[in-house]
Image (cartoon, rainbow, N blue to C red):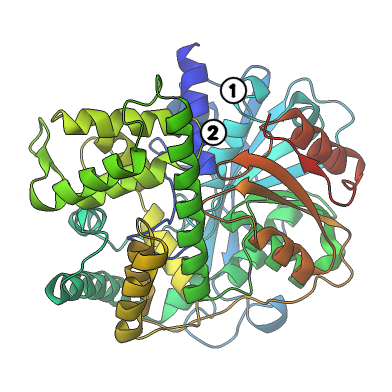
Amino acid sequence: MTRTAQRIRRVRRTLAGFAVAALLTAGCTLPAFAPRTEVQGEAAPAGSAPTWRACPEVADELVGRSAPDMRYECARITVPRDWGAGGTPATAGPGAGQTFEIALLRARSTKQRDRIGSLVVNPGGPGGSGVDTAVYLSFGSAFGGLPTDITERFDIVGFDPRGVSRSSPVKCISDADLDASFGYDPDPSSQAAFDGFVALSQRIGRGCGDRYGDQLPLYGTEQAARDMDAVRAAVGDDKLTYLGYSYGTLLGATYAQLYPQRVRALVLDGAVDPQQRLVAGSESQARGFERAFDNFTRWCTANAARCPIAPDARAAVTTAIDKAKVSPVRGDDGREATAGWVFYAVISSLYTESGWQELARAIDRLADGDPKEVFRLADAYAGREDDGHYSNLFDANLAINCADETEKPSREQIRQLQSQWRNKYPLFGPALAVGMLSCVEWPGGRDPYPTGRAAGAPPIVVVGTTGDPATPYEQTPRLASMLGVGRVLTWEGEGHTAYPQTSCITAAVDAYLIDLTVPREGLRCPAR
């Protein structure tokens, strides 16, 4: 496999790695993006045509080269900080009269034919860069990107949502606090350890509140969905064609409720149930990751030659985490592989089936005193660079998720759930419970998104994977039902998100995007 192919496949795994929980100590996202090139140019007002300029340097920095037969162009648009009721700019309040800049990238094939329009993409997170995603997906199916049937009929348009990466980014969490958060014991059982994470969450929230104050609610999903309509107008499409992964399904569902008459086709892959609040969503993820880990352990037993921690992979992983709590292995750079870093190596590896063998190797090498593979996997999840610097992915993740969330369990309730979920979901339950503290201790108001029907919208394809750890399959029919126009498409596979990983899923989604042919009711695609 060429170096470019290896890098793109790693990026495909990145795109699969976006979950929705607002948790710094649980399954939030799987960032592994390269340094961001700024999208230059004067920002055009919302609703007006932007000025596009060639920007091959974005692909050069992300991947090392441009995709064959692809041109890249970048632009910026301005949007109101507060769209206000009904989608008109607010005339009062903290964001009135102020704007954000939204960065766009358009990948257009030099072999384009019978152009349909633009396919707007979002990788999820929240906090993932759509600009980066458009580049990655432009490389074609041989590298885990989009099929040529799609790239030759659509411009692939990515945008960084407000607060994310190049779009007026939120940045308020220090690298030291992120290191402390990811390295923290995922199951702080003593009261002192639990209180320590409360204090860390409070410090993070206080720093972000001091910096952004009463504007924090303006980073919520409904505001971003209204920005997406400005993106639709900027690319000149009368109706939106959209591909959203994980949190991107929530963004797309919100758009469909706000602008049902402006929907051409939406593919929502890795579905989030918008009606599921913080506690229920966290338990759903605990269940999903526990199920995925069970699938991994069964794979280990059946493939002992490829799994050096067989026959009891669960015991090996649990032992590694327990040992790391009392005597963490120190790496060559002096960094300690604490229980938190080992835990996130596990989380990182469960987003794709291809990560299972990497996890087994990492745990095996850790037992021999080598933490390099553990750090590599965990850092890919955390978006931590070799120099210890983080992007703004988790800053944006918290700002967006906490602006959306209305439920605020007490610390005492979280402490009880930690114990209860330890019994039900022993490896992942405690971390998912404790992780809720991140939003509980978050300052500022809330701006919840709508949770109703997309009355008047055409059929919307909602894709679910039966082995998905981050957005468990049970959420797929719930999202489809809530929208009222959803059509479920099922992949009986492993990992987070499905398109375009198998010929069955690819054929169904491509036919919908190109010809608006809705998959037949109950279509289920086999794992292979």
Q: Residue at (70%, 42%) from the top-left corner?
A: 491
**Can you see residue 242?**
yes
Image height check: is 377 above or below 411? above
Q: Foreground: 367 or 305?
A: 305
Q: Which residue is mark 1?
A: 143
Q: The disc labelled 1 sits on which kind of residue?
A: Phe
**Quarter that holds the C terminus:** top right
Q: Residue at (54%, 27%) from the top-left corner?
A: 56
Q: Foreground: 95 or 196?
A: 196
Could you tell me which secondary element the residue under label 2 belongs to? helix
* Residue furthest top in the image: 2
**Can you see residue 241?**
no
Image height check: is 325 above or below 333? below
Q: Foreground: 145 or 54?
A: 145
Residue 256 lies, in percent from the top left, at 76, 65
Would you say 40 lies left or right of 324 here? right
Dot 2 and dot 1 residues touching (CB under 8 Å): yes
Q: Residue at (83%, 58%) from the top-left corner?
A: 263
**Mark 2 surroundings within 10 Å by alpha-carbon count, few (fewer than 14), some (14 through 19), many (20 or more):** some
Image height check: is 211 above or below 28? below
Quarter occupied by residue 450: bottom right
Quarter occupied by residue 248: bottom right
Q: The disc labelled 2 sits on which kind of residue?
A: Arg
Residue 162 lies, in percent from the top left, at 52, 61
**Mark 1 surroundings within 10 Å by alpha-carbon count, few (fewer than 14), some (14 through 19), many (20 or more):** many
Could you tell me which secondary element the residue under label 1 belongs to? helix
Residue 80 lies, in percent from the top left, at 58, 70
Q: For the residues marked 2 and 1, what is the alpha-carbon distance in whole angstroms?
A: 8 Å
Would you say 405 lies left or right of 223 here? left
Q: Which residue is mark 2?
A: 12
Residue 513 lies, in percent from the top left, at 83, 42
Image height check: is 192 above or below 237? below
